[in-house]
């Protein structure tokens, strides 16, 4: 019989597998069934329901998990890209996560969902602050830009259509916003 530490380790591994599979399955189809997610994750339905008692609980945890990973990715994104490209990359990824969330419709309109979404704002704003600081240090953006304003402005990215035309529009909108962040020289 496995010891308690091994059981916890197995439970964490199952939970992570379920979250990753659920992210992918819900991105493919907002109507993916919990049983299909359990099967793809290689666990039984009972295991899935022990971790996530209903569809809403799973969807909310996928969203929370995705946002947590994205917020935690800022140092790696900055290490892999110049600051302004890191900002672009990070917001493109955030937009993809939020598009998935929007595609889940009624599942994210409960009070619990609004609480999860509201709780994601401070860490997202802090992550944007880190990106803006790096951009400011590189001379790419002017000082004093409010990260919350940037998140609000960039929210247009996840309102574009999820198709090639929408992706092109999102890129244009992002560049318009970034042009507005750049330092400006004042004429005398």
Image (cartoon, rainbow, N blue to C red):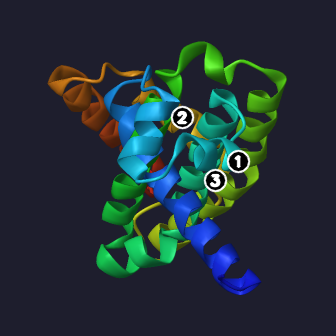
First reached walking from the N terminus: tag 1 or tag 3 = 1
Q: Nearer the viewer, mark 1 or mark 3?
A: 1
Callout count: 3
Task: Identify which residue, 15 or 167, lies in the foreground.
Answer: 15
Task: Identify which residue, 104 or 22, lies in the foreground.
Answer: 22
What residue is disc 2 on? 153
Q: Nearer the viewer, mark 3 or mark 2?
A: 3
Q: Quadrant of the N terminus?
A: bottom right
- Residue located at (83% from left, 24% from top): 111
- Quarter of the image for residue 117 reads top right
**Residue 50 circle label:** 1
In the rendered structure, the answer to whether residue 142 lies left or right of residue 112 reads: left
Q: Residue furthest left?
A: 164
Question: What's the distance in space between the residues labelled 3 and 2, CA to CA?
Answer: 14 Å
- Residue located at (55% from left, 40% from top): 45
Q: Residue 146 at what x, y percent from top left? A: 67, 51
In the rendered structure, the answer to whether residue 117 lies left or right of residue 150 reads: right
């Amino acid at each position: 019989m496995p010891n308690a530490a091994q059981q916890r380790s197995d439970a964490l591994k199952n939970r992570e597998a379920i979250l990753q599979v659920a992210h992918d399955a819900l991105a493919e189809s907002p109507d993916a069934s919990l049983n299909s997610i359990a099967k793809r994750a290689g666990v039984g339905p009972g295991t899935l329901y022990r971790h996530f008692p209903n569809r809403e609980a799973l969807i909310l945890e996928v969203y929370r998990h995705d946002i947590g990973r994205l917020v935690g990715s800022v140092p790696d994104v900055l290490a892999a890209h110049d600051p302004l490209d890191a900002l672009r990359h990070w917001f493109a990824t955030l937009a993809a996560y939020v598009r998935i969330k929007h595609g889940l419709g009624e599942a994210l309109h409960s009070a619990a969902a609004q609480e999860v979404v509201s709780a994601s704002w401070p860490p997202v704003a802090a992550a944007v602050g880190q990106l803006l600081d790096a951009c400011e240090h590189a001379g790419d953006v002017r000082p004093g830009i409010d990260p919350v304003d940037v998140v609000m402005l960039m929210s247009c990215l996840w309102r574009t259509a999820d198709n090639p035309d929408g992706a092109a529009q999102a890129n244009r909108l992002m560049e318009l916003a970034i042009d507005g962040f750049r330092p400006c020289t004042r004429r005398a």
